[in-house]
Image (cartoon, rainbow, N blue to C red):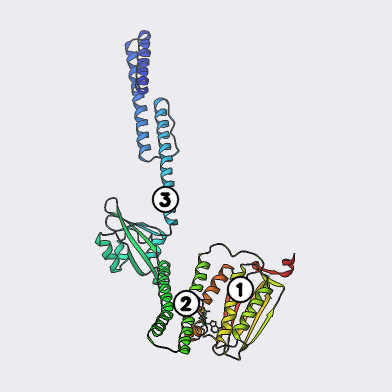
Amino acid sequence: MNIIWTRSIVSLVLLAAISAAIGAIAGVRAALTFAVVMLVVQACFSTFHTQRLWRLLDAPVYGEVPSALGIWGEIYYRLHKLAKRWHAQVRQVEQQHSRFIQAIQASPNGVAMLDDHDQIEWCNAIAEKHFGLDAKRDLRQHITHLVRQPDFIRYLNSHHYEEMLIMRGMGENRQRTISVQVFPYGEHRKLILTQDITELERTDSMRRDFVANVSHELKTPLTVLSGFLETLRELPLDEADRMRYLDMMDSQATRMQNIVRDLLVLANLEGDIRPPGDELLDMRAVFRHLEEDANSLSGGRHRIGFDVDDSLTVAGAETEVVSALGNLVTNAVRYTPEGGAIDVTWQRENDRAVFMVKDSGPGIAAEHIPRLTERFYRIDRSRSRDTGGTGLGLAIVKHVLQRHHAELDVKSEVGRGSTFIVRFPASRTALRKSLAA
Ligand code: ADP
C-alpha cells in the first residue's frame, strides 16, 4: 500500500479512536462534534495546499520550496527534487546546444538552416559573410528574397542537389567564388553548406597555366629540333652545313635540358617541407664561385666589381643560397649590354646580412617588377632566350629566399639599370668570429 493511503487510513483510525474515547467520556454528541470539526479542519488544510500547489505549478519559482506539515511537505519536497532534476537536464541540453553552435561557428565553411518554407532558421558567421546576410536581422526571411542570384534561385527550386553550385562575385567586394550545396533533411528542411573556393580556383588556374607554359616552352625547341632532323635526313648537306645544323640542334637540346633542370629544381624546392638547414656558410667560397661564374659568362665584356665583407655569413643550405645569389649575378651579366658595369656587395645592415647586385643594364619598368618571380615571366623574351634563360631563375630565387626567410627587393628604372637586394633575417645572420668560436 502506498504512503498516501497508509497515512490517510492511520489519521482516520486515529480520529475514530479519539472520537470514540470522547464519546465514552462526554457522550456521542461531543464525539460527533469533535469528528466533524477535525474533518472540516483537514478539508480546509487540503484545500489551502491544493490551491498553493496550483499556484506553484502555474508560476514555478525555481529553488523555492514551500514548507508544510505532513504529506504536503513530502509532496513539495518531491516536486522540488523533480524540478531540480529537470533543471539539470535542461542545463545539460543547453550546454550541448551551445557547444554544437560554437563548433559550427568555428567551421571554416558556411552553414545555413532553412525551414520547410525556405526561410532562414539559423546561419553561422561564415554563411553570413558568403551570402551577405545578417543572422539576426534576416532570421525567418525567405532566403531567395536575400540571395537573389538567378542561378541560386534555380538551384534551390530544382530539388536536384547532387552537384554543388558555383557562385562567383560573392562575399565582401564581390570578389569571392563560393561553392554551395543543399542537403535536404527532416521534414522538407534544408541545410546549406558553403565554401570559399577562390584560392582553390586560383591555384587550379595557375596549375593549368603552368602546364600550358611548360608545354609551350618545350614545344618551340622541339619543333625546331625536328625541323633540323628532317633537313638533315632529306637534304644532301656538305660537312660544314651539317656541323652548323648539329650545333643549332645542340643549342635547342641544351635549352630543353635547362628548362627541365630548372623545373626539377623548382619542384624539389616546392616539395621540400624541411627547413633549409642552419650550417654557417663559407661565404668566401660562395663569392669566389659567383665571381668566377660572372667573369666567365661576361667574357670580359663588363666591368664587374665585388665588395664582400668576409666576416659576414649566414646559416642555410649552401647549394640553394649559391643558386639564388648566382641567378641574380648571372641575370645582371646577361641583361647588361657590353661595356656595362655590375657591382656586387655583401654587407651588414643593422643585424642583417644584405646581398646587393647592381647593374647598368636596361632597367625594368615598374609594372613588371611585382611579376618578375612568376614562372616563365619574361620582359625581353628574345634576350632571355638568346642568353640561355629559362624564365624560371627568379622563381627559384623566390623559393630559396622564402625557405631562408629572406626578402627580395628590386629597385629599377628603365634606362637606369637595376638593383636586386636580398636581406637575410637577423636570426640567420652571423659574424665569422662566431663561426670560429
Ligand atoms: P630568365 O631566365 O628569362 O632570365 P628570370 O626568372 O631569371 O628568367 O628573370 C625573369 C625576367 O626578368 C627576365 O626574363 C628579364 O626580362 C627580367 N630580368 C631579370 N633580371 C634582370 C636584370 N638584371 N635586368 C633587366 N631585366 C632583368
Amino acid type of the residue that numbered disc 2 sits on in the rendered structure = Met
Residue 45 screen position, x and y as percent: 37, 27
Between discs 3 and 1, the one toward the N terminus: 3
Q: Residue at x 53, y 62 (%)?
A: 273
Instruction: Point out the frontmost of discs 3 and 1.
Output: 1
For marks 3 and 1, give the CA distance: 53 Å
- In the displayed structure, 107 sits above or below 231; it is above
Write down the quadrant of residue 11 in the picture. Answer: top left
Q: Residues within 10 Å of mark 1 (few under 14, many from 20)?
A: some
Residue 100, which numbered label? 3
Circle 3: element type? helix
Query: Visible in this render: residue 402?
Result: yes
Pick the quarter of the image with the N terminus.
Answer: top left
Left/right placement of residue 426 relative to residue 265 reads: right
Amino acid at the residue labelled 1:
Val
Disc 3 packing (10 Å; few <14; some 14–19; many ≥20): few
Taking the spot 41% from the left edge, 25% from the top edge, the residue there is 70
Residue ID at (63%, 78%): 290
Give the CA distance from mark 2 to mark 1.
23 Å
Q: Is residue 192 left or right of residue 85?
A: left
**What residue sits right under mark 2 in the picture?**
256
Question: From the viewer's perspective, is 283 left or right of 232?
Answer: right
| Image quadrant where one finds the C terminus | bottom right
Residue 322 numbered tag: 1
Residue in front for this viewpoint, 336 or 107:
336
